[in-house]
Amino acid sequence: MKKNKRFNRRDFIQSSIRASLVVSVGGIGGLALKNSTGRDWVWQIDPFECNQCGRCATECVRNPSAVKCVHAYDICGYCDLCGGYFIPGAVKLDTGAENQLCPTAALIRKFIEEPYFEYEIDEDLCIGCAKCVKGCTSFGNGSLHLQIRHDLCRNCNECSIARVCPSKAIKRVPSDTPYMIKGSFTKTTDT
Amino acid sequence: MSKRVKIVLFGILIILVQVAAAQQRFPKPEFETGYVQPSPTTPEPRGLAVEYMDVLVLLAVLSLATWFALRSRSRRGILWLSVFTLIYFGFYRKGCICSIGAIQNVALSLSDAAYNISITALAFFLLPLLYALFFGRTFCAGACPLGAIQDLLIIHPISLPPWLRKSAGIIPVVYLGLAILFAATGTEFIICRYDPFVGIFRLDAPYHMVVLGVAFLLLGMFVSRPYCRFFCPYGVLLNWMSRFSKWHLSITPSDCIKCKLCTSSCPFDAIDHPTEESAPPPGRTYYRRFILYSLLIPVWVLVGGFIASKSYTYLSRAHQDVYLSELLIHHPELVNDPDNLDIQAFLSSGKTLDTLVEDARVVQQKFRTGGWFMGGFIGLVIGITLLNQVVFRKRKDYQPNRGDCFSCGRCMDYCPVKN
Amino acid sequence: MKKSVIYIFLSLIVIIILIIVIGDFRSTRPDRMSGNPYKLNLDRIKSVDPNLVTYQETKNYRINARQAGGIAVAGEKIYLAADTFLQVFDYAGRQILKITLPEPAGCLEVSKQGDIIVGHRNAVALYSAAGEMKWRSEPLDERAVITALALKDGTIFAADAGNRAVHLYTAEGKYVDSFEGKTSIEGNHGFIVPSPYFDLGVNPDGELWVVNPGKLALENYTDEGNLRSYLENISPEIDGFSGCCNPAHIAIMADGSFLTSEKGVVRIKIYEPSGELSTVVALPDKFMEDGEAPDVAVDEEGIVYALDYDRNMIRIFEPK
């Protein structure tokens, strides 16, 4: 099995290039790994930065969107005249369709006791348009807010809503703290 | 800053955080009817353990594909493996996570210290490259769902003229360069955005994504694996690795009888013909040409880098901040357009135009520097491709082109030589 | 023949792919995206006859604070509580006094003698005109969130949004009593305070007026906490209040008129003592969208001082 000289030289070049490629691939991997925390990332909306532009309903790769309205009951005022439920200037404060703000009637109003009402979201109907969020944030306490629901989210490598989010409210968050529900995390004071 | 000032500042910060928290925890009404307040549900994302499962599946599929291509020489095995890949990584995992897109995660993690790449994405980036370094592009053969869906729908492959193949072969290089540049500058992930088959894998994707996928499949009926050959940026990396692979799929198990059957079996024009025995040894003109083309490579690199860097104003417009700042400068009247959500959001953010312009300038600067790398890289590839056209390599048999071969195993199946 | 058909077909597909990719890329540029199809239409509330506005902004002072608390005006001086500071300015915006408080203050009120009463989250404190602390009341319970103060002779009224109650203190800071606005009338629930906006004031006749934000009403109480009368006009039009918790802030003018400040659609208006809209001070276009309702104060001449939390400014509106 005697190889000729020329073949040997080629073989040598080949294996040295291969070795340097292994080193560089390993180097890239090592550099990237140095930064890694071993955690995974998921996408989430920072409700304090969201400006309710409506793109969550239209830009998600899923239809209906994986973004849904979430109700932070902790900070809800249980108002009769709910800015998130009623259109501005509703004729009567009842569950009539003409008085409701939600385009899909996904917000359910329940009487608890005088004068308090509970509002609940039917996620099957919610399309994440943020109309109620806008109403609630403008007129009420802001207890209604948008969140990415991780049972629906495809966790795309780059969120197609984040790409066009005008207030840059959609961020990567560690997968062990996948939600930013208002009232249960403290708003970071801005600089 | 003295320690005391720091402590005072920290104290103020704590107080402020408490104020913010107090605002949020405003006491709710006291209910008298025993109403129990529900709490919002938080469906968990896919667990980390399941993510690691994907890495294991990838490892298994890669190893099996390698075994089928190099040891058992079974085209049928590779075929069924690609069906599995299509179902698992394609339709079940919806095309996300994928090695092609992982390039961008690596690029972003190297450029942005705040972004920590997940182990899964890193493994998906590294494993196929390492396999290609030792066994050829077996990833393309059986472990890539994008390759699998195209491979299964090759109906009437036509052979493309070499000039077209070689020049279209530059597209993936440009695509790779742009993808890394865009990812590293935090602009966007174009590979994922224009992944043609994700629309098909997901079944509920937006209309244009499905159309894009169908268009590629229709193209692929005649031009086999069009995405892999003329677009896939990861293919560029695999191509290089595979050129220097230690082992590689071989067409015949023993001696080639030069029956040419394999060349018609390969839908990708990836089989090199043997050089003619009677060809004269390379002469003076050959060496002169070789030296000329080698010397031209640095010129290509410089020209490419120069052009790409100079076009930074154009390229950087892909970044939303740069685009928005230019829009506001050239069309200040848009400030009054209530339907322009981006401008309205910017105005209500309280940021001044100056800070936006400054942010945009930083991004543009990154594009300017990154442009040198990207253009230089593209120039280098063009130079080497041209040099390869004149390099004379003696081949005795019909051999797979190690760079272009996807290790799909069709040629093995066609080879009449059996052990 | 057949081959050329295939080539034409393939070229068409390549063109389609290019159109989709380029078209999609261009479609997400800020100037090519469509407006919000789910926009909450507030035009009906926002569109107001501009002739109703009889005030204009004449001055404004930037304040250096991270979290502004409240504002008061008395004796040609502006009093401001912000962060953990109490500051006094003259009308030219010059700082006369600045004292550090032990904790942040959310509201303040100034007596005729020039004493400054400061409302902390769960306590009330009195400072002399020179900035010296005279007394500090016993802290209230955990739920307390004091949002407003008012003075009448020897009594200090403190609105506690957390407990939905008005507390009474003596001029020496001794707690006297509380009332929750409940009456024997069927269906009267007392104060409904869904958020930390709960204001009150005493008019020149010595009547205590408390905002019932959940009812969008102004209620007049006796000093013992009995409801005497109320003013209510729930409407999205300019002359009414809408949303939750409005008016967020009030101040009572020298003639007993009410100066009101609303959140949601931020605006400042003045009502006659009878409850009819008398004039508009500022419309939403003067404030940040979805901004916080500014705290308001008014001097003897009817000049309005608004504390703009979003822009960190004291803004002064004078009659045209």
Image: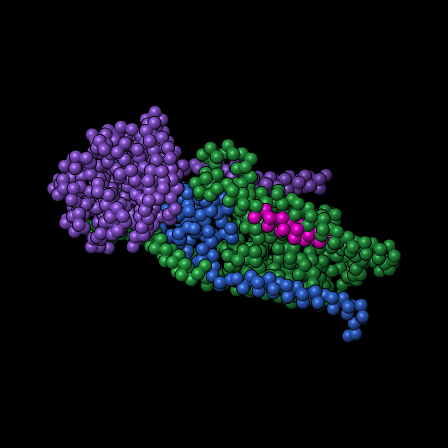
Q: Is residue B317 left or right of residue B52?
A: right
Main SS class of the magenta portion in the image: helix
In the rendered image, residue B301 lying in the magenta stretch gets the answer no
The residue positioned 26% from the left and 28% from the top of the image is C278
Q: In front here: B330 or B240? A: B330
* Rendering coords of residue B192 (x, y %): 55, 50
> Farthest residue toward the top?
C51
Q: Is residue B333 above or below residue B3?
A: above
Q: Is residue B367 magenta?
A: yes
Q: Colour of chain C?
A: purple
Q: Is residue B73 left or right of residue B384?
A: left
In the image, taking residue A164 as reference, residue B405 lies left or right, namely: right
Quarter of image, res C282 = top left
Residue B139 coordinates in the image, percent (x, y): 61, 60
Which region shows up in magenta? B362-383
Question: In the figure, what tint was chain A given?
Answer: blue
Q: Where is residue C277 drawn, in percent x and y?
A: 26, 29
Quadrant of the rendered image containing residue C113: top left
The relative height of residue C31 versus residue B162 in the rendered view (above or below) is above
Q: Nearer the viewer, residue B133 or B386?
A: B386
Residue at coordinates 67% horizontally, 57% vertically from top-left? B239
Q: How is the image coloured?
A: by chain
Q: Residue at x 32, y 52 (%)?
A: C100
Q: In the image, residue B63 lies at what x, y percent?
A: 59, 65
Tell me if residue A85 can be seen: no
Q: Which chain is green?
A: B
Q: Residue at x 73, y 51 (%)?
A: B300
**Left or right: B302 as drawn, with respect to A116:** right
The quarter in which the N terminus of chain C is drawn is: top right
Residue B212 vertical position relative to residue B389 in the rendered view, above or below: above
Question: Can the viewer see residue B100 in this picture?
Answer: yes
